[in-house]
Image (cartoon, grey):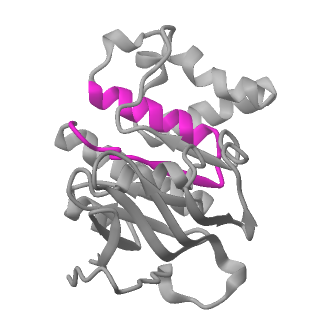
Amino acid sequence: FNHRNDIKYNFNIFKRPLAMDTIYNIKNIAYSYEKNFTLQISELSFLRGSTAALTGTTGSGKTTLLKMLAFLTYPEKGTIEYKSHVSQINNYSGKAIVFQLQNPYLLKRSVYKNALFPLKLRKLKKHERIKRIGEAFDMLQLSTEKYFNRRSCELSEGEIKRISLAIRFSMHPETLILDEPTSNIDYENNILIRDALLHYKKKYNTTIILSSHNKEWLDDVSDTVLVMSNGKIVGKSK
Protein backbone atom coordinates (compact mmCIF):
# COMPACT_ATOMS: atom_id res chain seq x y z
CA PHE A 1 0.00 0.00 0.00
CA ASN A 2 1.09 3.56 -0.65
CA HIS A 3 1.64 5.44 2.61
CA ARG A 4 2.16 8.93 1.19
CA ASN A 5 0.38 11.45 3.39
CA ASP A 6 -0.51 13.80 0.54
CA ILE A 7 -2.82 11.32 -1.16
CA LYS A 8 -6.54 11.79 -0.60
CA TYR A 9 -8.67 8.69 -0.58
CA ASN A 10 -12.37 8.48 -1.31
CA PHE A 11 -13.48 4.90 -0.77
CA ASN A 12 -17.17 4.46 -1.58
CA ILE A 13 -18.44 1.00 -0.85
CA PHE A 14 -19.36 -0.74 -4.13
CA LYS A 15 -18.45 2.55 -5.89
CA ARG A 16 -22.06 3.29 -6.79
CA PRO A 17 -22.56 7.00 -7.54
CA LEU A 18 -26.11 7.44 -6.29
CA ALA A 19 -26.10 9.96 -3.43
CA MET A 20 -29.41 8.59 -2.18
CA ASP A 21 -27.63 5.32 -1.27
CA THR A 22 -25.01 6.97 0.93
CA ILE A 23 -25.59 6.73 4.67
CA TYR A 24 -22.32 8.33 5.88
CA ASN A 25 -20.29 11.15 4.35
CA ILE A 26 -17.08 12.21 6.06
CA LYS A 27 -15.20 15.33 5.00
CA ASN A 28 -11.88 16.68 6.29
CA ILE A 29 -12.11 15.32 9.82
CA ALA A 30 -9.27 15.56 12.31
CA TYR A 31 -8.95 14.47 15.91
CA SER A 32 -5.81 14.59 18.04
CA TYR A 33 -4.96 12.72 21.22
CA GLU A 34 -1.87 11.49 22.95
CA LYS A 35 1.53 12.60 21.67
CA ASN A 36 2.09 12.85 17.95
CA PHE A 37 -1.15 11.11 16.92
CA THR A 38 -3.84 12.70 14.79
CA LEU A 39 -6.71 10.99 13.03
CA GLN A 40 -7.06 12.66 9.63
CA ILE A 41 -9.49 11.62 6.89
CA SER A 42 -10.14 13.95 3.99
CA GLU A 43 -13.05 12.10 2.41
CA LEU A 44 -14.83 8.83 3.12
CA SER A 45 -18.33 7.49 2.55
CA PHE A 46 -20.32 4.35 3.32
CA LEU A 47 -23.37 3.09 1.48
CA ARG A 48 -26.60 2.06 3.15
CA GLY A 49 -26.82 -1.69 3.60
CA SER A 50 -23.09 -2.31 3.07
CA THR A 51 -20.69 -4.09 5.40
CA ALA A 52 -17.41 -2.20 5.74
CA ALA A 53 -14.42 -3.24 7.79
CA LEU A 54 -11.43 -1.41 9.25
CA THR A 55 -8.13 -3.16 9.84
CA GLY A 56 -4.66 -2.02 10.84
CA THR A 57 -2.21 -2.27 13.69
CA THR A 58 -3.16 -1.44 17.25
CA GLY A 59 -3.24 2.35 17.66
CA SER A 60 -3.90 3.06 13.99
CA GLY A 61 -7.15 4.89 14.75
CA LYS A 62 -9.80 2.22 14.14
CA THR A 63 -11.60 2.59 17.46
CA THR A 64 -11.52 6.39 17.33
CA LEU A 65 -13.11 6.38 13.88
CA LEU A 66 -15.77 3.87 14.94
CA LYS A 67 -16.67 6.01 17.96
CA MET A 68 -17.03 9.02 15.67
CA LEU A 69 -19.34 7.06 13.39
CA ALA A 70 -21.40 6.18 16.47
CA PHE A 71 -21.35 9.86 17.54
CA LEU A 72 -19.75 8.99 20.85
CA THR A 73 -16.76 11.16 19.94
CA TYR A 74 -16.84 14.21 17.71
CA PRO A 75 -14.01 15.44 15.43
CA GLU A 76 -12.18 18.66 16.22
CA LYS A 77 -12.43 19.61 12.55
CA GLY A 78 -14.54 18.60 9.60
CA THR A 79 -17.99 17.06 9.32
CA ILE A 80 -19.65 13.67 9.59
CA GLU A 81 -22.99 13.49 7.80
CA TYR A 82 -25.46 10.73 8.60
CA LYS A 83 -28.25 10.41 6.04
CA SER A 84 -27.33 13.85 4.65
CA HIS A 85 -27.51 15.56 8.05
CA VAL A 86 -24.50 16.95 9.90
CA SER A 87 -24.91 15.20 13.21
CA GLN A 88 -24.00 16.10 16.77
CA ILE A 89 -22.90 13.80 19.55
CA ASN A 90 -25.61 11.34 20.68
CA ASN A 91 -28.19 12.47 18.12
CA TYR A 92 -28.41 8.93 16.86
CA SER A 93 -26.87 6.74 19.52
CA GLY A 94 -29.25 4.25 21.09
CA LYS A 95 -31.78 3.96 18.28
CA ALA A 96 -30.65 4.31 14.67
CA ILE A 97 -26.99 3.55 15.49
CA VAL A 98 -25.88 0.88 17.95
CA PHE A 99 -22.25 0.44 19.04
CA GLN A 100 -20.51 -2.50 20.69
CA LEU A 101 -17.23 -2.05 22.56
CA GLN A 102 -14.28 -4.36 22.02
CA ASN A 103 -14.81 -5.66 25.55
CA PRO A 104 -18.57 -5.45 26.14
CA TYR A 105 -19.95 -5.93 29.59
CA LEU A 106 -23.27 -7.04 31.00
CA LEU A 107 -25.10 -5.54 33.94
CA LYS A 108 -25.06 -7.45 37.23
CA ARG A 109 -28.32 -9.20 36.59
CA SER A 110 -29.52 -12.19 34.59
CA VAL A 111 -28.84 -12.47 30.87
CA TYR A 112 -32.59 -12.22 30.23
CA LYS A 113 -32.89 -8.97 32.17
CA ASN A 114 -29.88 -7.61 30.29
CA ALA A 115 -31.62 -8.43 27.02
CA LEU A 116 -34.91 -6.87 28.14
CA PHE A 117 -33.41 -3.59 29.31
CA PRO A 118 -32.79 -1.78 25.95
CA LEU A 119 -36.06 -3.01 24.52
CA LYS A 120 -37.98 -1.65 27.50
CA LEU A 121 -36.28 1.70 26.94
CA ARG A 122 -37.68 1.60 23.40
CA LYS A 123 -41.12 0.98 24.89
CA LEU A 124 -41.72 -2.13 22.83
CA LYS A 125 -44.68 -4.29 23.71
CA LYS A 126 -44.02 -7.49 25.63
CA HIS A 127 -44.72 -9.86 22.75
CA GLU A 128 -42.38 -7.88 20.48
CA ARG A 129 -39.61 -7.93 23.09
CA ILE A 130 -39.90 -11.70 23.49
CA LYS A 131 -39.97 -12.24 19.73
CA ARG A 132 -36.87 -10.12 19.08
CA ILE A 133 -34.83 -11.61 21.90
CA GLY A 134 -35.70 -15.16 20.87
CA GLU A 135 -34.80 -14.54 17.24
CA ALA A 136 -31.51 -12.81 18.10
CA PHE A 137 -30.41 -15.55 20.50
CA ASP A 138 -31.24 -18.18 17.89
CA MET A 139 -29.01 -16.39 15.36
CA LEU A 140 -26.09 -16.59 17.79
CA GLN A 141 -26.96 -20.21 18.68
CA LEU A 142 -27.60 -19.26 22.28
CA SER A 143 -30.08 -21.50 24.05
CA THR A 144 -32.52 -19.31 26.01
CA GLU A 145 -33.06 -22.20 28.42
CA LYS A 146 -29.32 -22.44 29.08
CA TYR A 147 -28.44 -18.75 29.27
CA PHE A 148 -31.42 -16.65 30.39
CA ASN A 149 -30.90 -17.18 34.12
CA ARG A 150 -27.11 -16.97 34.08
CA ARG A 151 -25.08 -13.93 35.11
CA SER A 152 -22.04 -12.40 33.48
CA CYS A 153 -19.65 -13.86 36.08
CA GLU A 154 -20.72 -17.33 34.91
CA LEU A 155 -19.93 -16.68 31.23
CA SER A 156 -16.81 -17.00 29.10
CA GLU A 157 -15.54 -14.01 27.12
CA GLY A 158 -16.83 -15.59 23.92
CA GLU A 159 -20.28 -16.10 25.44
CA ILE A 160 -20.39 -12.50 26.65
CA LYS A 161 -19.53 -11.24 23.16
CA ARG A 162 -22.19 -13.43 21.54
CA ILE A 163 -24.84 -12.41 24.09
CA SER A 164 -23.93 -8.72 23.73
CA LEU A 165 -24.22 -9.03 19.95
CA ALA A 166 -27.57 -10.81 20.27
CA ILE A 167 -28.84 -7.95 22.44
CA ARG A 168 -27.78 -5.47 19.75
CA PHE A 169 -29.41 -7.57 17.05
CA SER A 170 -32.67 -7.42 19.00
CA MET A 171 -32.55 -3.60 18.94
CA HIS A 172 -32.89 -3.65 15.12
CA PRO A 173 -30.52 -0.73 14.51
CA GLU A 174 -30.25 1.03 11.20
CA THR A 175 -26.45 0.93 11.56
CA LEU A 176 -24.49 -1.56 13.68
CA ILE A 177 -20.91 -0.64 14.66
CA LEU A 178 -18.68 -3.30 16.20
CA ASP A 179 -15.19 -2.77 17.60
CA GLU A 180 -13.16 -6.00 17.39
CA PRO A 181 -16.17 -8.32 17.86
CA THR A 182 -13.99 -11.47 17.73
CA SER A 183 -10.88 -10.42 19.66
CA ASN A 184 -9.64 -12.81 22.36
CA ILE A 185 -12.18 -15.54 21.66
CA ASP A 186 -11.80 -19.07 20.32
CA TYR A 187 -12.30 -20.33 16.78
CA GLU A 188 -15.79 -21.71 17.44
CA ASN A 189 -17.09 -18.35 18.68
CA ASN A 190 -15.44 -16.60 15.73
CA ILE A 191 -17.39 -18.80 13.34
CA LEU A 192 -20.66 -18.40 15.25
CA ILE A 193 -20.36 -14.60 15.18
CA ARG A 194 -19.40 -14.62 11.49
CA ASP A 195 -22.41 -16.73 10.53
CA ALA A 196 -24.76 -14.68 12.69
CA LEU A 197 -23.62 -11.41 11.11
CA LEU A 198 -24.11 -12.81 7.61
CA HIS A 199 -27.58 -14.10 8.53
CA TYR A 200 -28.62 -10.85 10.21
CA LYS A 201 -27.36 -8.72 7.34
CA LYS A 202 -29.19 -10.84 4.77
CA LYS A 203 -32.46 -10.59 6.68
CA TYR A 204 -32.44 -6.91 7.70
CA ASN A 205 -30.03 -5.23 5.24
CA THR A 206 -28.43 -3.40 8.16
CA THR A 207 -25.42 -1.19 7.54
CA ILE A 208 -22.54 -2.80 9.44
CA ILE A 209 -19.17 -1.19 10.15
CA LEU A 210 -16.64 -3.18 12.15
CA SER A 211 -12.96 -3.64 12.89
CA SER A 212 -10.70 -6.63 13.31
CA HIS A 213 -7.11 -7.81 12.91
CA ASN A 214 -8.34 -11.10 11.41
CA LYS A 215 -8.03 -10.58 7.65
CA GLU A 216 -9.56 -13.92 6.67
CA TRP A 217 -12.56 -13.36 8.94
CA LEU A 218 -13.05 -9.82 7.59
CA ASP A 219 -12.99 -11.08 4.01
CA ASP A 220 -15.81 -13.49 4.90
CA VAL A 221 -18.14 -10.91 6.43
CA SER A 222 -17.43 -7.62 4.66
CA ASP A 223 -17.88 -6.04 1.25
CA THR A 224 -14.84 -3.78 1.63
CA VAL A 225 -11.85 -3.76 3.98
CA LEU A 226 -10.16 -0.40 4.58
CA VAL A 227 -6.61 -0.35 5.93
CA MET A 228 -5.65 2.25 8.55
CA SER A 229 -2.20 3.39 9.65
CA ASN A 230 -1.20 6.33 11.86
CA GLY A 231 -4.69 7.81 11.83
CA LYS A 232 -5.19 7.65 8.07
CA ILE A 233 -6.88 5.44 5.51
CA VAL A 234 -3.92 4.13 3.51
CA GLY A 235 -5.45 1.47 1.30
CA LYS A 236 -8.18 -1.00 0.52
CA SER A 237 -7.51 -4.72 0.68
CA LYS A 238 -10.77 -5.95 -0.80
Q: Is residue 19 left or right of residue 36?
A: right
* For residue 227, above or below residue 183: below
**Residue closest to the eye, 106 or 169:** 106
Question: Can residue 221 be seen in this snapshot?
Answer: no
Q: Position of residue 166 (x, y in %)?
A: 50, 36
Q: Is residue 171 magenta?
A: yes
Name the residue at 22% across, 84% down.
Answer: 2
Is residue 86 highlighted in magenta? no
Going 34% across and 56% down the picture, which residue do you hit? 61
Q: Is residue 219 above or below residue 121?
A: below
* Placement of 134 over or under 235, stated as above or below: above
Looking at the image, which residue sits at the far front? 35
Give 20 or 60, whichever is nearer the viewer.
60
Q: Quadrant of the C terminus?
A: bottom left
Q: Is residue 80 visible?
A: yes
Seen in the image, is 207 located left or right of residue 179? right
Compared across the picture, whether 209 is left or right of 129 comes to left
Along the line of sight, the residue nearer the viewer: 226 or 78:
78
Residue 152: percent from left, percent from top:
39, 14
**Snapshot quadrant of residue 140:** top left
Image coordinates of residue 187 in percent, x first then y, are 18, 43
Image point 71% across, 57% down: which residue? 87
- 92 up-or-down from 26: above or below: above
Tell me where the magenta segment starts and ends, as one range.
157-184
Question: For the image shown, how many numbered marks are present on the structure?
Answer: 0
Residue 29 lies, in percent from the top left, at: 52, 66
